[in-house]
């Protein structure tokens, strides 16, 4: 079976499951309805594993051929714009598809046990089948989004994902807070989607296509030619139209991935069933925003990329701080998700494309496990979610306790910096340690090392100007100067440095552009698709060209490096806090403790995901991460911005790599700064809560900690501000509009009516006597005379109507005689009639 066919089948089967459950779900009932959904997502997961295994089993050239021949169908046209249905087949698609289906399968499995103990009837109608129908539709929407090669169909599936989240968050619609949470999520995402539509419209207007690759190629050509969207003089607050396009596309991700200031909906989304929370936070909705930014990376300008980094940095900071004081176990995890998503968006903003997707993959496994673990706790404790009422549950829920702890270690960034085992230098750590460290390494590079990249020599500055301005033969010369400046900046000779040798070789193979803008035969190709530059625009692949681009990028402010560093200490603190208060210490509510229990149907997925978390942490390094690096060769191939490989130390593809300046190796620096943050954060949490809530309660009474705690407990008053400014402002605006309508618009109408009435009264009084005289003297007399004439005519006509039969006979005979005489007078009679009359008259005279 072709890989693209397998992926398409895996998308369609959950849709069929949705149809079956929507129409025949009530007849299937418990538990058969859940079996249908589980079988459907199981099939999709099987397709994902099949494609992943096959993809890993072929070489890069074969993958390039498969990507090139991926399915495309011209569905229709809107004017001159083609509407293409196709499968985006590359390493990123394969990884995302596997991640979504594998995690969704175990969430479905968990849901069978979770929903079995829930009341699922409203007004006598079961909702059990509806829940699994919505899950199937959710998976269909997310998988369709992942494989779409067109921005149009990606947007269609994007909106379906939003619809499914609305249905699942508001699943308990009979509860007011659940329906309000669903509405809040839906409306907040519509705000972000407005920007997405704006960005999508600009893409289509200036590129004439919805295809992601074709749009990226067109944008690259326009950038070098300073035409199209880059020729526009329009700017808003100093932002060019191209930057507005990139920010608009990112606005969609701000909504779906709940980034500041649209982050407020995600904690309230905990109103839905816990498996829904796991699916939203791990594998589907919030992952969609990160995936979108990764796909449109080539369309971003430096200003748009910096905007993304700022938003990610703010989000990861404020949400981690809010998580410190939360007491609802699900809301702690919700804010931790927001913070981790902030790391991913921040990573994409600073150019750590591979690291951000690496973190998305590892985060999906341990966050799904954490949410399912919280669901096990909530279900086992009779729906209690307050961690201050728990404690000591490790004895009642050992599997949940220790799988949850593995998730805590993973998100905390557990690892042993500077320690390696064996000849392969095996590093001990979990997913967050590797992926988060790589994001921070790139941030370090952008903040401290980037200013020295090709900028330590005047030749490098001149090279950057030439590379930015000239897309033809001067680009090769300029990039050669950049390579030389790069070598001088790092105190190595061009012949002895592998990096400089690679740079020199790359500078000779850079894409050339002739006077017509078409690329010549020396264009550099892709490592995955096998395309030449003529297929995708100007590919500035190779270290020298990327260095030239890097010179035009703004430096990362140092505060944007230090804030993620600080949060790296706070994350293990609040995660250890929730684990300790839930599973350790003495029970604080014996009613909760006495009823606590584990369900095998629910802890089996926890065990599988725990193994997956550990396996993914190490297999990512050897399997998935190289696949992401391969996908990045195309996804980051931009002429405007650069991506930095946070792990490799050699030139490769379209990404810059970490440098080895003396004393400034990012990984070595991070090992000293944040390497043991997990131990410090978790140790501090264990110390504060070792005796229960006593120490923490005492600290809350100390000013200014009390004021800070109150602000964080109120979520930094974002909801209050939005309620006052947006909701309250909307209400006030409506009241003002109502007053304007009532007192101004209606007042003008009523005033004009009053003036017209007064004018009529005045005119009536002025014209009263002349009108009356005319009326009485002429009009009334004519009417009266006509009436009298009609009366007289009527009196004369009614006289023959006496009611006597003989009178009617005489009248009839007389009328007939008159009619006969008239006929005889005007018409000559025939001979027969004349003979008849003569006989009649002769007889009459004889008598």
Image (tube, rainbow, N blue to C red):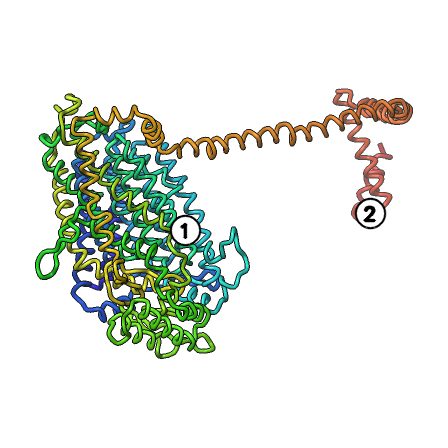
Where is 754 relative to 527, above or below?
above
Q: Is 19 left, or right, of 686 in this rendering?
A: right
Q: CA distance from mark 1 to mark 2?
A: 115 Å
Nearer-N-terminus badge (1/2): 1
In which quadrant of the rendered image does the N terminus lie?
Answer: bottom left
Residue visible at 74% across and 22% down? 805
Position of residue 504 measured from the top left corner of the image (x, y, whole percent): 31, 75
Q: Which mark is residue 829?
A: 2
Horizontal side of 574 relative to 183 (left or right) equals left
Position of residue 508 in the picture relative to residue 417 (left or right): right
Quarter of the image for residue 839 reads top right
Crowding near the residue tagged with mark 2, few <14, some 14–19, many ≥20 C-alpha atoms within 10 Å: few
Nearer the observer, 309 or 5: 309
Location of residue 275 in the rendering, given as x and y in whole percent from the top left corner: 23, 39
Mark 1 highlights which residue? 307
In the displayed structure image, the side of residue 105 where residue 443 appears, left or right: right
Say which of 572 and 110 sits in front. Answer: 572
Disc number lying in front (1 or 2) = 1
Residue 390 lies, in percent from the top left, at: 18, 27
Dot label at residue 666: none
Residue 19 seen in the figure: no
**Helix, strand or loop for disc 1:** helix
């Amino acid at each position: 079976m072709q890989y693209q066919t397998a992926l398409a089948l895996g998308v369609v089967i959950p849709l069929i499951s949705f149809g079956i459950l929507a129409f025949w779900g009530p007849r299937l009932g418990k538990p058969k309805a859940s079996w249908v959904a589980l079988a459907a997502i199981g099939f999709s997961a099987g397709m994902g594993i099949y494609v992943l295994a096959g993809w890993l089993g072929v070489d890069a050239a074969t993958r390039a051929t498969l990507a090139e021949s991926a399915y495309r169908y011209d569905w229709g046209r809107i004017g001159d714009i083609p509407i293409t249905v196709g499968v985006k087949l590359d390493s990123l698609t394969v990884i995302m598809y596997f991640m979504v289906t594998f995690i969704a399968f175990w969430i479905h499995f968990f849901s069978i046990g979770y929903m079995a103990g829930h009341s699922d009837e409203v007004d006598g109608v079961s909702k059990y089948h509806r829940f699994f129908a919505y899950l199937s539709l959710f998976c269909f929407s997310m998988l369709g989004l992942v494989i779409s090669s067109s921005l149009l169909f990606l947007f269609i599936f994007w909106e379906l994902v939003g619809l499914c989240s609305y249905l699942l968050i508001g699943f308990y619609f009979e509860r007011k807070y659940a329906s309000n949470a669903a509405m809040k999520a839906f409306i907040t995402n519509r705000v972000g989607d407005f920007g997405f539509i704006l960005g999508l419209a600009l893409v289509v207007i200036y590129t004439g296509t919805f295809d992601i690759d074709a749009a990226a190629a067109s944008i690259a050509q326009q950038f070098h030619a300073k035409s199209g969207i880059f020729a526009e003089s329009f700017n808003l607050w100093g932002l060019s139209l191209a930057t507005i396009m990139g920010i608009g596309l990112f606005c969609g991700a701000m909504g779906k991935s709940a980034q500041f200031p649209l982050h407020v909906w995600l904690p309230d989304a905990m109103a839905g069933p816990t498996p829904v929370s796991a699916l939203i936070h791990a594998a589907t909705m919030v992952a969609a925003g990160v995936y979108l930014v990764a796909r449109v990376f080539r369309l971003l300008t430096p200003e748009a990329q910096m905007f993304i980094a700022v938003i990610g940095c703010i989000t990861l900071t404020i949400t981690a701080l809010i998580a410190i004081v939360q007491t609802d176990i699900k809301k702690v995890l919700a804010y931790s998700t927001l913070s981790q998503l902030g790391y991913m968006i921040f990573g994409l903003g600073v150019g750590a494309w591979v690291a951000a997707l690496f973190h998305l993959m590892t985060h999906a496994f341990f966050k799904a496990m954490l949410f399912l673990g919280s669901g096990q706790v909530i279900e086992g404790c009779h729906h209690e979610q307050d961690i201050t009422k728990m404690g000591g549950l490790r004895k009642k829920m050992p599997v949940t306790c220790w799988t949850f702890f593995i998730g805590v270690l993973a998100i905390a960034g557990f690892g042993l910096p500077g320690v390696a085992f064996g000849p392969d230098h095996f590093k001990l750590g979990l997913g967050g340690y590797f992926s988060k460290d790589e994001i921070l390494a790139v941030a370090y590079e952008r903040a401290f090392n980037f200013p020295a990249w090709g900028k330590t020599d005047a030749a490098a500055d001149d090279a950057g100007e030439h590379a930015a301005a000239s897309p033809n033969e001067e680009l090769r010369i300029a990039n050669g100067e950049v390579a030389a400046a790069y070598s001088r900046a790092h105190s190595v000779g061009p012949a002895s440095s592998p990096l400089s040798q690679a740079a020199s070789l790359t500078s000779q193979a850079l894409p050339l552009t002739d006077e017509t803008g078409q690329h010549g035969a020396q264009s550099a190709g892709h490592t995955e698709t096998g395309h030449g530059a003529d297929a995708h625009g100007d590919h500035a692949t190779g270290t020298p060209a990327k260095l030239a681009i890097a010179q035009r990028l703004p430096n990362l402010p140092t505060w944007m490096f230090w804030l993620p560093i600080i949060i790296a200490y706070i994350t293990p603190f609040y995660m250890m806090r929730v684990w300790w208060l839930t599973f350790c210490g003495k029970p604080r509510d014996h009613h909760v403790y006495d009823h606590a229990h584990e369900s095998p149907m629910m802890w089996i997925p926890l065990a599988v995901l725990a193994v997956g978390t550990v396996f993914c942490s190490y297999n990512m390094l050897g399997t998935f991460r190289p696949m992401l690096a391969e996908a990045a060769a195309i996804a980051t191939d931009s002429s405007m911005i650069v991506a930095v490989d946070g792990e490799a130390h050699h030139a490769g593809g379209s990404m810059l790599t970490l440098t080895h300046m003396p004393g400034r190796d990012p990984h070595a620096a991070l090992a000293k700064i944040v390497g043991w943050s997990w131990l410090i954060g978790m140790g501090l949490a264990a110390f504060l809560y070792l005796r229960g809530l006593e120490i923490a309660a005492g600290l809350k009474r100390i000013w200014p900690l009390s004021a800070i705690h109150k602000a964080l407990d109120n979520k930094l008053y974002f909801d209050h501000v939005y309620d006052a400014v947006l909701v309250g402002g909307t209400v006030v605006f409506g009241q003002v509009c109502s007053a304007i309508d009532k007192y101004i618009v209606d007042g003008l109408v009523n005033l004009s009516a009053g003036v017209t009435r007064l004018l009529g009264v005045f005119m009536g009084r002025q014209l009263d006597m002349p009108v009356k005289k005319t009326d009485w003297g002429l009009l009334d007399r004519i009417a009266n005379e006509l009436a009298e004439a009609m009366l007289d005519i009527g009196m004369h006509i009614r006289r023959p109507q006496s009611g006597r039969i003989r009178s009617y006979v005489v009248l009839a005979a007389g009328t007939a005689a008159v009619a006969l005489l008239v006929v005889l007078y005007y018409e000559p009679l025939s001979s027969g009639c004349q003979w008849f009359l003569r006989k009649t008259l002769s007889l009459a005279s004889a008598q």
